[in-house]
Amino acid sequence: MEPRLVAAPDGAGIAVFSLGGRAGPRRPLLLVHGTASDHTTWRVAGPLLARSRAVFSIDRRGRGTSSDGPSYSIEREYEDVVAVVEALARDADGGVDVLGHSYGGRIGLGAALRSPLIRRLVVYEGAPVHVRNGRVATAQLGRLEADVNAGRPDRMLDAFLRLEVGFDDAGLAAYHANPVWPDRVAAAERTLLRELRAETSPPAGLAVLGRVAQPVLLVQGSESVEWFHKGTRRLATRLDDVRVVEIHGAAHAAHHTHAPEFVRAVMTFLDG
């Protein structure tokens, strides 16, 4: 697909892909991917969502067909999503719904604080990390950085997926065999470390992102590692208008492994 490029405030070009669907009474839906990924992570769930509404996805800055800015912070990513939402809202003459996975969920929360054009927000295991007991320890970041410096971004991504996401040997083997793996490694080499550092910065913290006023659906997998569940619970206590749904049998990739159940939960919330 040929993307549309939307200019971010700092000059980065954010690629926006149409996944199909058509304009109608339902609002457009924007999908925001997580760390070390790109818009193709929605290749299973995206077409299912597009059966009833116009659906769009982005390559976040620094990956895929999107360009990067002169400096990085998670706030730049908030601004990217707001710029895309504003462009889609102009086309649709109204608000836009946003669905973010993992780090993309945090970006969705930050964007919702900056734009009333975001109508409803779905956050799939994207709650802010607990900084005091944060998963990203300085020593661990040093080990991941050492892998990159040694020319082994694949080893860095393996370690991240094991320690942070909960992948086992079978899950990693399947991921390595997937045709998208080389692109995931390339994206991780450019962006993974900066995102791990940014996710414990104050603008990405619970005290800030817990102020979102729009209706929010928090999605988690029943088999996900405990810190995703803990983060979801903590965020749910802060939000004024929140629902929580658990996808039984799923972990951190329900949009692949349990797509019908995932899409059903999202659509029920957006149509509510």
Image (cartoon, grey):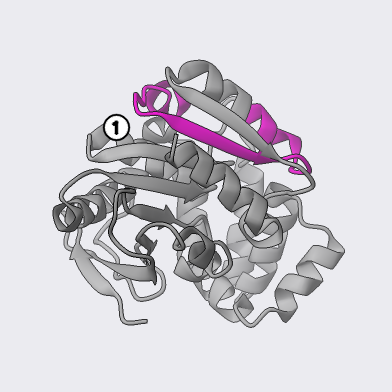
> Is 195 on the left-hand or right-hand side of 222?
left
Residue 39 in view (yes/no): yes
Identity of the residue drawn at 42% across and 35% down: 204
Along the line of sight, the residue nearer the viewer: 185 or 116: 116
Along the line of sight, the residue nearer the viewer: 161 or 134: 161
Along the line of sight, the residue nearer the viewer: 200 or 21: 21
Residue 133 in view (yes/no): no
Residue pushed farthest front?
25
Looking at numbered disc 1 in the image, what kind of residue is underneath it?
Answer: Leu
Q: Residues within 10 Å of mark 1 (few under 14, many from 20)?
A: some
Along the line of sight, the residue nearer the viewer: 93 or 204: 93
Q: Is residue 20 above or below residue 121?
A: below
Identity of the residue drawn at 66% across and 50% down: 261
The reply to whether the magenta stretch includes residue 141 is no
> Is 137 on the left-hand or right-hand side of 110?
right
Q: Give the x, y percent position of residue 74.
A: 36, 45
Q: Which residue is mark 1?
A: 113
Q: Give the x, y percent position of residue 271.
A: 43, 40
Q: Is residue 69 above or below residue 25?
A: below
Q: Secondary structure at mark 1?
A: helix
Q: Give the x, y percent position of residue 155.
A: 69, 69
> Is 231 on the left-hand or right-hand side of 204?
right
Snapshot quadrant of residue 224: top right
Snapshot quadrant of residue 116: top left
Q: Which residues are magenta?
A: 205-231
> Is 140 on the left-hand or right-hand side of 65?
right
Identity of the residue drawn at 49% across and 37% down: 269
Q: Is residue 199 above or below residue 147?
A: above
The reply to whether the magenta stretch includes residue 221 is yes
